[in-house]
Image (cartoon, rainbow, N blue to C red):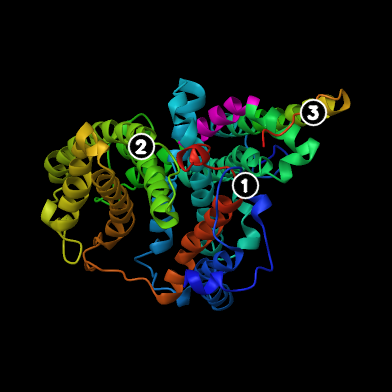
Amino acid sequence: MRRWFDDLPKYADDSSWWPKGTKRCRPEFFLFWLGVPLTLLAYFTVGAVLCLALGLNQTNMNDYFAFGVWIVVDLAVIGLGAGAFFTSFLNYIVGKTELKPIVNAAVLIGFICYVGAILMLGIDIGQPIRGWFGFWHANVHSMLTEVMFCITTYAIVLTIELLPSVLDNRRISRVPEFGTFSHNLHTIMIVFAAAGTFLSFFHQGSLGGMFGVLYARPFADRGGLGIWPWTFFLFIMSAIAVGPSFTTMVVMITEKITGRKLTKHNVKMLMGKISGWLLVVYMVFKSADTMWWAYIKLPAAGLTMDQMYQAPYGYWLLWVELGLCGWLPALMLVQEKVRASYGWMFVAMLLACIGITLNRFVFTIQSLALPVLPFEKFYAYLPSWQEWGIASLVLGFGLLVFMLAYRYLPIFPQEPELND
Amino acid sequence: MFPFAYEWVWDIGHIVFFGLFYGVLSVIGGTLTLTILKTMLDLWAGHIHEPEH
């Protein structure tokens, strides 16, 4: 196919916009592959129009499942996007400058995750034009209000953090105003990194805290410290553990697709090491929390584990989340031999990312599937095609922004040196 | 969101929640404004940052 494109007349040349010292595919080839995200966005548009015009009866959500695939995807991408704030925190505030070559990618991925999640939530709330009600009539006793405030504010911070990369584009930076503004933004970035860390800490925690305070939902309800249930801290720990893995994994996938080296392997290994040790810490606390919940909390309420795990959401979910996609990747990533291997490190990071997604799935769906009244049954939930369409926004939007950013922005500063 | 909104109550919840929220917004907005002002001053003084490429 590449040869077919090469035979076409060269009518457009955008090479002066590419980052210095890099090579990109021909514009025709690029436009052809843009069809993938545009198709996903078209699928989203159909689902969104149906849901906005006809209502939530287009979904398989009901009185039992007030949260569905949108919230699962939302929680998962916000957890996976935590690589942005944590990598920025380590680079700008802790002074781990070895991570500098991957910070731009982490910020870009975080931006995609957060903006994608916010756009999807715009459909979830039913009437997007009334989205501002949550700010104007804020319920300060709700964890979700805090999440909404922090996510939207952090999306602004991510946009500001991404701005220098846009202004550093080869052509844009020739404009003196933009080049100077970008330089000044670089020098003050530590303030935005600190603000982002503060905001992320609280919204990652409150997303978990929201489940921990559901005292009528025995699957999610937990004890805690003060007003913060244990899930508040577990969600923060899981996000900062898996965020660096997701960032590195996306970089590795991009390397394989483009056939170009983007960051040195030692940078990826460092990200893997950070992720691995944080995952071990998370797994220790998560395992302790699960044991306490299973052997103390549930029996005290007259419940058993067997009641919590029923088909199709059986015990296999617990073993996959905590074992296969929890302890296994944690123990793999702390091994230097595993991190030295491109393939094994990718496998470990992929498992870790699946683990956090499963965690968000069980807290969202399984919590609601359990019967809480005598006349209720154990229900299962399967999203409708319209719901999948809206959820595909994150992937379509993410691919579109990432493809454009990879082509035109200096996201990977080590790329020219590694591909000489 | 603002003290003049009818549901606003001067309790600890509103003070802490909105105090932190407006605090963070002030830091972000203030830093961005200062950066824009510094850029304008740099440009007027002729201190233009040349691109490295």
Residue A323 at what x, y percent from top left?
A: 16, 46
Splitting the image into 4 quarters, where does residue A96 fall? top left
Disc 2: which residue? A265
Which circle marks residue B48 in the picture? 3
Q: Nearer the viewer, mark 2 or mark 1?
A: 2
Q: Chain of mark 3?
A: B
Q: Amino acid at mark 3?
A: Ile
**Magenta stretch: helix, strand or loop mostly:** helix
- Kind of element beneath mark 3: loop
Please state the extent of the stretch shown in magenta in the rendering. Answer: A187-200
Q: Is residue A140 above or below residue A399?
A: above
* Label 1, residues with CA under 10 Å away: few <14, some 14-19, many ≥20: some
Residue A195 part of the magenta-drawn span: yes
Mark earlier in primary sequence (2, 1): 1
Describe residue A216's horizontal placement relative to residue A291 as left or right: right
Q: Amino acid at mark 2?
A: His
Q: Residues within 10 Å of mark 3 (few under 14, many from 20)?
A: some
